[in-house]
Image (cartoon, grey):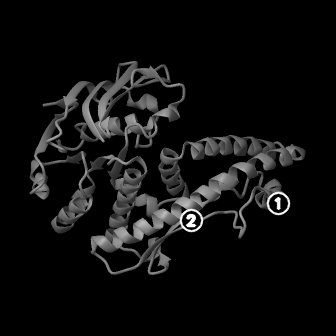
């Protein structure tokens, strides 16, 4: 995977930008003081991959002040095949062109331009709320399995309808929704079980290979509906048995929206036992597992987007982590000073991109 050209209009603080990238310069170091727009470039690449910002803002907040639209475009090569993506956002609507053809669904973009973002907020995948972990793994799984995304959206729609019924005390209709919800949970839970087993093995291996700590780590999927035999019928029975509690609480108390993913170190909750350094490293390694999973599934390296993440590591760990990332085809990293380019010694030629308040120098 390699982005050959990127351009944008009215995106964040960039009125216009147009950048070409050379294959013999696979490491792109974006240099600027804080607040000048270096992370906005990474957000543009991320948006072209996932049709959403990586920061918790609305799409309309990405439009440059005093403008009424933004436009993103990139050309790329994947497995020696050329492709392009263009996203035009205006009047709270998105028009997406994939290889110059209009996409009928936003989800069609997933898996086209593969990228993995490493940011300081990644630490919350491990130490944050359940909803953050679910959001991360839902996006992870949706890229590799469009059917998972389809069932997930159907489930979210059904749960909203069920919660409306519970709030309005129309409880005679619950059984209709529980039958449909059981079907969606059956697929979602089985897929989560299947993928987490693979990801856990990769996570354990990555922690051992990086070699900073001797502790044993583990990732475990923790569904709110715990069954020895997962089936639509058994899930439905579980939902029915929870009906009285749901009516009392006036919302759905179990289901895929209550599932969690638990991280352990030496069989103890990572949040309680792990140091800040271990949490930071574990979150970075989990993102690298995501990248390696995409590589195996799509047979191509994703583009790596590193947003200030290595600045909190000491120099030895900076160098070791960069080396551990492997033979990436293309990497973008934001830093506040050119001196950080030293950690890429013995790598391919560097491309230094200097940014000043939304302008490429």
Screen quadrant of the C terminus:
top left
Q: Which mark is residue 179?
A: none
- Residue 221 has which mark? 2
Q: Residues within 10 Å of mark 2 (few under 14, many from 20)?
A: some
Residue toward you, 90 or 295? 295
Q: Is residue 93 left or right of residue 306?
A: right
Distance, label 2 to label 1, CA atoms, is 21 Å
Circle 1 Cα neighbour tier, 10 Å, few/some/many (<14 / 14–19 / ≥20): some
> Could you say which quadrant of the image residue 332 lies in?
top left
Residue 163: x %, y % from top left: 74, 46
Q: Do labels 2 and 1 touch, CB within 8 Å?
A: no
The residue lying toward the viewer, choosing from 248 and 290, is 290
As drawn, 57 above or below 198:
above
The residue closer to the viewer here, 129 or 206, is 206
Circle 1 SS class: helix
Is residue 64 something that shows in the picture? no
Q: Which residue is mark 1?
A: 237
Compare marks 2 and 1 and give the one earlier in the sequence: 2
Could you tell me residue 119's position as x and y percent?
33, 52
The percent coordinates of residue 69 (x first, y second) are 39, 20
The picture places residue 81, in percent across and down from the top left corner, at 32, 34
Q: Is residue 272 left or right of residue 250?
A: left
**Which residue is found at the position 22% from the left and 37% from the top?**
36
* Secondary element at tag 2: strand
């Amino acid at each position: 995977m390699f982005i050959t050209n990127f351009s944008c209009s009215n995106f964040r603080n960039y009125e216009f930008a147009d950048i070409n990238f050379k294959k013999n310069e696979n490491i792109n170091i974006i240099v600027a003081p804080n607040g000048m727009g270096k992370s906005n470039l990474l957000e543009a690449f991320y948006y072209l991959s996932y049709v959403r910002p990586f920061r918790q803002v609305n799409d309309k907040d990405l439009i440059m002040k005093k403008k009424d639209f933004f436009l993103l475009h990139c050309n790329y090569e994947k497995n020696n095949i050329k492709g392009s993506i263009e996203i035009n956002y205006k009047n709270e609507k998105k028009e997406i062109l994939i290889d110059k053809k209009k996409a009928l669904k936003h989800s069609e973009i997933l898996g086209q331009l593969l990228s993995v973002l490493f940011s300081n907020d990644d630490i919350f995948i491990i130490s944050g709320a359940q909803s953050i972990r679910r959001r991360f793994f839902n996006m992870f799984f949706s890229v590799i399995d469009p059917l998972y995304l389809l069932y997930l959206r159907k489930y979210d729609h059904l749960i909203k309808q069920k919660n409306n019924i519970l709030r309005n005390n129309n409880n005679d209709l619950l059984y209709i929704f529980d039958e449909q919800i059981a079907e969606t949970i059956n697929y979602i839970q089985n897929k989560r079980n299947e993928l987490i087993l693979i990801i856990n093995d990769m996570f354990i291996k990555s922690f051992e290979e990086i070699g900073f700590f001797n502790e044993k780590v583990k990732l475990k999927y923790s569904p709110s509906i715990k069954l020895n035999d997962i089936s639509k019928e058994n899930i439905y029975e579980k939902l029915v048995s929870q009906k009285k509690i749901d009516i009392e609480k006036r919302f759905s108390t179990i289901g895929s929206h209550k599932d969690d993913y638990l991280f352990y170190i030496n069989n103890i909750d990572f949040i309680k036992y792990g140091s800040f350094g271990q949490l930071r490293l574990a979150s970075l390694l989990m993102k690298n597992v995501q990248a390696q999973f995409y590589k195996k599934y799509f047979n191509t390296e994703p583009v790596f987007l590193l947003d200030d993440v290595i600045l909190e590591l000491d120099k030895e760990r900076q160098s070791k982590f960069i080396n551990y990332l492997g033979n990436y085809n293309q990497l973008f990293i934001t830093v506040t000073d050119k001196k950080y380019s030293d950690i890429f010694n013995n790598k391919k030629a560097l491309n230094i991109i200097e940014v000043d308040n939304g302008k490429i120098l």
